[in-house]
Image (cartoon, rainbow, N blue to C red):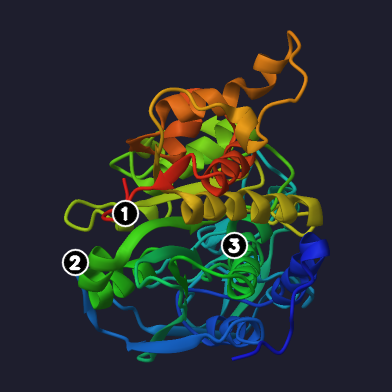
């Protein structure tokens, strides 16, 4: 199905930032109309199949929660003025707040307020998914300025049986083996932690659909944690059989360095591709341990699930000061940041697509000049100019794939892959028949 809106990849960062700007005001949560509105907008770019899972459904050790929707929420000061207003910033309301309409003293109200003394101008992001309560978030500076008196509190929300929604698209390739891309759509107005992952996933989906594909690509848009568990509970056997590599997409939109959290195994195809790309093209990246996990890699790499899923990010969740606050906004996430996030995942996918094992077809070192692969005039620099090619031939023994050769020989993928192509066209190497990928 052709998308309603096609991304111009010559300015992919600007296009994704424009889409983010449209989605930013929506109040998303684990469930509810904000999730459906977001999926509806993304469906203009990708042919998403939107699923519904009823409240109360058991998903492993968890239960799909009731559906939450909010129409309005505010606090009136003693003069009757709206001083904390959900309509002004949806982070002002604690996620999953239950309905309330009552008058409280300032002392009583303080028990329901949340702020950050260490970030006095930021509104924190607070939720209470699995215990019923209500509350409001505000800057600490505003909280300290509240006068004594009686305050009226109104939360016009609904918490009732409904559904959990998630979106999914399969982009078929030559093989039914799959690369799995997962991102989440369950936070309100935060840009890097929430929307940068879905933006990059949307861009990758259109890019993949526009090119020949060796593998099939499955992209899902889910609420974090409960969505991953729900998806796994419905699809685990299929994923175990078909997924050869995958990435959890989050925090991909700022202009800081790149970050990497491995799978629990640490040596999957996704891990190897990510490390090869990052070490060669983004050497200042931050290399975290699986002990530093915190997003849906927790579910995909859990014992008994054991999917080959890694996370490639820009600033890692929990590690940047704006995380889970109103400071994670459309100024923190930039077109250049999103373009960089898109590019690093694109490079990882290109490497996975090209990854094969090769072996030389001649005994001894070939005479490269016969094949137009050696300079016509020999100088003291001639050998230096072709040493990478000679080393590649020396180690192309059929037991090492492209990623292993890139790592072993310290040749960046951007140089190694064209070189393999030249040697293949010259008949000096051949691809080893494919079985299971290394």
- 281 shown above or below 213: above
Q: Position of residue 430 (x, y in %)?
A: 42, 46
Q: Mark 1 = which residue?
A: 433
Q: Residue at 46% across / 57% down in the picture? A: 248
- 7 shown above or below 417: below
Q: Mark 2 = which residue?
A: 61
Q: Which mark lies nearer to you, 2 or 1?
A: 1
Q: Earlier in the sequence, mark 2 or mark 1?
A: 2
* Circle 3 residues within 10 Å: few <14, some 14–19, many ≥20: many
Q: Say which of 157 and 375 sits in front.
A: 375
- 251 shown above or below 206: above
Element type at mark 1: loop
Q: Say which of 207 and 47 sits in front.
A: 207
Q: Earlier in the sequence, mark 3 or mark 1?
A: 3
Element type at mark 2: loop
Q: Mark 3 = which residue?
A: 194
Camera sees residue 136: yes
Q: Position of residue 129 (x, y in %)?
A: 40, 69
Q: Position of residue 211 (x, y in %)?
A: 61, 70
Contact, mark 3 vs mark 2 (Cβ under 8 Å): no
Image quarter hosting the N terminus:
bottom right
Camera sees residue 288: no
Q: Say which of 226 and 416 sits in front.
A: 416
Q: Residue at 34% across / 78% down in the picture? A: 65
Relative placement, left or right, of 259 versus 172 is right
Q: Residue at 52% across / 60% down in the picture? A: 126
């Amino acid at each position: 199905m052709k998308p309603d809106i096609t991304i111009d990849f010559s300015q992919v960062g600007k296009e994704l930032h424009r889409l983010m700007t449209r989605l930013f005001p929506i109040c998303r949560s684990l469930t509810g109309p904000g999730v459906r509105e977001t999926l509806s907008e993304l469906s203009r770019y990708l042919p998403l199949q939107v699923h519904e899972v009823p409240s109360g459904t058991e998903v492993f050790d968890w239960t799909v929660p009731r559906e939450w929707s909010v129409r309005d929420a505010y606090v009136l000061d003693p003069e009757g003025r709206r001083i904390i207003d959900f309509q002004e910033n949806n982070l002002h309301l604690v996620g999953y707040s239950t309905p309330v309409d009552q008058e409280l003293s300032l002392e009583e109200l303080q028990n329901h307020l949340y702020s950050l003394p260490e970030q006095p101008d930021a509104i924190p992001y607070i939720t209470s998914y699995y215990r019923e309560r209500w509350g409001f978030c505000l800057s600490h500076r505003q909280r300290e300025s509240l006068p004594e008196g009686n305050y009226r509190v109104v939360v016009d929300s609904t918490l009732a049986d409904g559904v959990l929604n998630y979106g999914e698209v399969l982009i078929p390739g030559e093989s039914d083996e799959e690369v799995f891309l997962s991102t989440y759509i369950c936070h309100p107005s935060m840009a890097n932690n929430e929307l940068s992952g879905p933006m990059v996933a949307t861009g990758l989906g259109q890019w993949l659909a526009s090119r020949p594909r060796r593998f099939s690509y499955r992209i899902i848009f889910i609420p974090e944690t409960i969505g991953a568990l729900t998806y796994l509970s419905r699809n685990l056997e299929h994923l175990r059989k078909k997924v050869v590599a995958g990435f959890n997409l989050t925090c991909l939109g700022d202009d800081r360095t790149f970050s990497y959290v491995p799978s629990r195994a640490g040596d999957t195809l996704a891990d190897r591709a990510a490390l090869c790309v990052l070490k060669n093209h983004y050497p200042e990246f931050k290399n975290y341990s699986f002990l530093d996990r915190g997003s849906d890699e927790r579910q995909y790499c859990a014992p008994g699930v054991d999917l080959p899923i890694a996370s490639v990010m820009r600033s890692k969740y929990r590690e940047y000061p704006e995380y889970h606050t109103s400071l994670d906004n459309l100024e923190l996430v930039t077109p250049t940041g999103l373009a960089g996030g898109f590019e690093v995942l694109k490079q990882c996918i290109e490497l996975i697509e090209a990854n094969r094992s090769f072996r030389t077809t001649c005994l001894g070192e070939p005479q490269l000049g016969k094949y137009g692969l050696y300079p016509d005039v020999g100088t003291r620099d001639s050998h230096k100019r072709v040493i990478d090619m000679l080393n590649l031939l020396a180690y192309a023994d059929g037991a090492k794939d492209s990623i292993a050769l890139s790592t072993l020989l310290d040749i960046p993928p951007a140089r190694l892959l064209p070189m393999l192509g030249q040697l293949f066209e010259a008949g000096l190497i051949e691809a080893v028949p494919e079985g299971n990928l290394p």
